[in-house]
Image: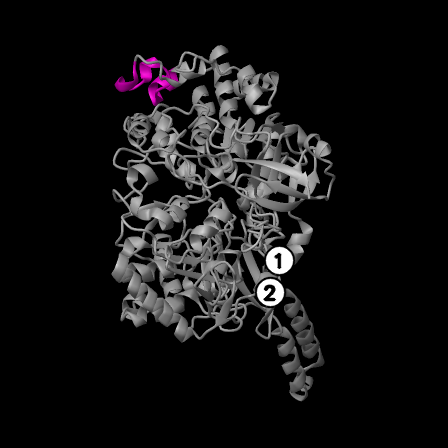
Amino acid sequence: MLMPQTSMSRRGFIKASGALAALAAAGEGAALAGGGFVAEAAQEANEETIAWSQCNVNCGGNCIFQWHVRDGKVLYMETDNTGNSDLQARACLRGRSMRKWLNHPDRLLYPMKRVGKRGEGKFERISWDEAIQIIHDNMERIYANYGPNSVFINYATGMYSTTGRNPSKRLLSLLGGFVNQGADYSTHMMQVVMPYMFGSDKTKGSIYSPYDNINASSFTEAEAHSDLIVMFGNSPAETRMGGANATWDFAKVREAVYARGGKVVNIDYRLNETSSAHADEWLPIRTGTDTALCCALVHEFIVDGKTDEEFLVRYCVGWDEDTLPESAQGQNLSYKAYIMGEGYDHIAKTPEWAAEITQIPAEKIRELARDLEKAEAPFVVQGWGPQRHTNGEQTSRAISMVPIALGKIGLPGTNTGQREAEPPVYLVSALPFKNPVTTTLPVYQFINAIDHGHKMTATNAGITGADALGVDIKCLWNYAGNCLTNQHGDINYTHEVLIDENKCEFILVWDTVMTDSAKYADLLLPDAMRSEQLNMQTQGYSEYYTGVTVGGPAQEAPGECRIHYDVCADIAETFGLRDEFTEGRTQEDWIRFLYEQGREKHPEMPTWEQILKQGVYKTKPDQAIGLKDFRDDPIAHPLGTPSGKIEIYSESLAKLNETWELEEGDKIFAIPEFDSGFQGYGAATDEYPLYCSGFHHKSRTHSSFGFIEELEQAARQQMWINPVDAEPRGIAMGDICAVKSPAGEIRIEARVTNRIIPGTVGIPQGAWHKADMQGDRVDKGGCINTLTTYRPTPLAKGNGNAHSIIVQVTKA
């Protein structure tokens, strides 16, 4: 095994230095007579070693760990202290609790097979040989009986590493393939709809991704040039914590903007942690109504004569009648006609119209419009929460319309309305695989694909890469994820589908602890954690730097936990495919191969021997301005849309609305107009009079870390509720409440606070589901996905219901 060289700790160095200095002062005779003293000094000098690793969960950061190790056991963790203090990937307090996870008494230690019903969590210990044979027999049977379109690797993000998740994909690709994942739970609606606005065809021009620095500007650009920051549902202090993550970048943005006499506006249904010390930044809004606000802002730009008409004509399609495609002309279908009340609904989108919907006073909307009009370099930026609504396909486009209408994109200090840019380069690649299957299933549709996959098509379920799925999903393969239930949605309904063994015939779960999803496994395998093996990974996707960390193991994996790659190699061997799977390489060999492959493209990287010694390599990328090339020359650098321009009106979306089979009440909109969405604005009833939305919690990364007791105590799972809503219900701070939706019921502690808008309650997502699923199914863990109703969005077929919920709250 290729082991990283370790360096002496500072404490050990000081001890050894002192001892050796004393020895030198005593002279040669003392040295000869004091051999034991020299040995003792050396022993003290080596009492601790350091193993490099990272926090490999899905917060967007991969903060750096230095594990201090003695006698093969982690003592404590120190984080990144290398290089300039302005670029240190220092772990947050949550990440620094990883040692608790590493050594937790609830670690899974042995392979186990289910002996109770799915969901009961009853298992018995088996050997690895038996586990591998069970996998072989089931995969052989399922591929033979149903084919590769019946196999799905479920969406899972509990592990980010070059060899983390891909061994399973590499193995199944060799066995015949699997249905691909379409989009993800983070940006599902945005990923699918924004390409219709910013481009999807590489042969025509640039294409949209929420994970690049082409379609969005970097926070470093805002720091350098912006004079106004307008944030929609964007809270880096809760979603992107860590020393090199966006929360650090935004802190510098705020300082720079204020120093220039500028302003920050944070639009959210609650006073989030990012603006908690700057309450004047908060503009409260009813959850799920951002599009209405954006429409009213654009209305004011038009009334005030501040829209950049030259830009809108040259760079956009569908702004007004003259820029509409021929198929839409003469019908008042332009965005401007909709805003000014000349469209089908004949309602002008005035601040007064928006005020009733958003709960933002009309004068506040006008004030924000004036601020945007006066700004030289407004940086309009959205988080990913606003698009996780049932109307999120509208919201992500509507927010981008704010800078587009002003012509403030592609210029210094501006942004496209998307979330801030992500790093442009990843120095090393992941373990490669080549899936022979092209069929792609929207990730949120997996439960429908188990229930009635044979009925799912491109036009009724968003299948891509094929006209239809053709078969039900019969095998779920779940590595390092909790999206079977906890992070998926509508847990009670999902439970009913998963427990039916006539539907999905084999569920494999690979994890480190007994998550709620793990309880549904037919076979449950214990994984070695990244700090228990040689590990390599780049910077995180929301850390605006370029780097790589190599190190470990810090300690041995407990019990019979094994490395994912090694187990997959053993499974491949049962099919006679070990050589094809490994290509003659161990995991350690692959890590070195991938590193040196990356270094060929980036020769400035340290050598393999150097990175083993130093552990970390980091460098800063240049600032980025979203769509700058397009703005500079739209002919030479067109977008990958049919027109090569920003398509405010999408002829393609209009056609999909006519040809797709949609749920009753659903619609695919050609322009980013306001639509309430399922269980959105106007859906509250006497039975369910409050709106409910989720948000990211500082004690968890989604559900990762959700079982660490110290974190649960430090940041308790609490429902935010305004005093206006709490007092009539007799609810006080700390009371345990019953929260009920059409889909389920939870128990949760109340946090009565003015930091949330009246009429809406907020529940942190990711809490671990704790319900008697054979009994009353009331969730004592306070998991918000007990409350969400399963209804994929019209276009993306995504998880819009994550933040679109109606509830009643009572004192339990």
Q: Nearer the viewer, residue 234 or 31?
A: 234
* Amino acid under disc 1: Ile
Magenta highlight range: 310-329
x%, y% of residue 339? 44, 16
Vertical relation: 537 (above or below) 333: below
Q: Residue at x 39, y 69 (%)?
A: 567
x%, y% of residue 663? 38, 33
Principal secondary structure, stretch drawn in magenta: helix
Mark 2 lies on a secondary structure that is loop
Label 1 near label 2: C-beta < 8 Å?
Answer: yes
Q: Which residue in the structure is indicated by mark 1?
A: 708
Q: Residue at x 46, y 24 (%)?
A: 674
| Quadrant location, the N terminus | bottom left
Magenta segment includes 326: yes
Magenta segment includes 95: no
Q: Is residue 799 left or right of residue 152?
A: right
For marks 2 and 1, give the CA distance: 8 Å
Q: Check the image and tell me how it is coloured.
A: one colour
Q: Which residue in the structure is indicated by mark 2?
A: 104
Residue 330 numbered tag: none
Residue at the extreme front: 775
* Amino acid under disc 2: His
- Binning the other alpha carbons within 10 Å of mark 2 as few (below 14), some (14 to 19) or many (20 upward) gives some
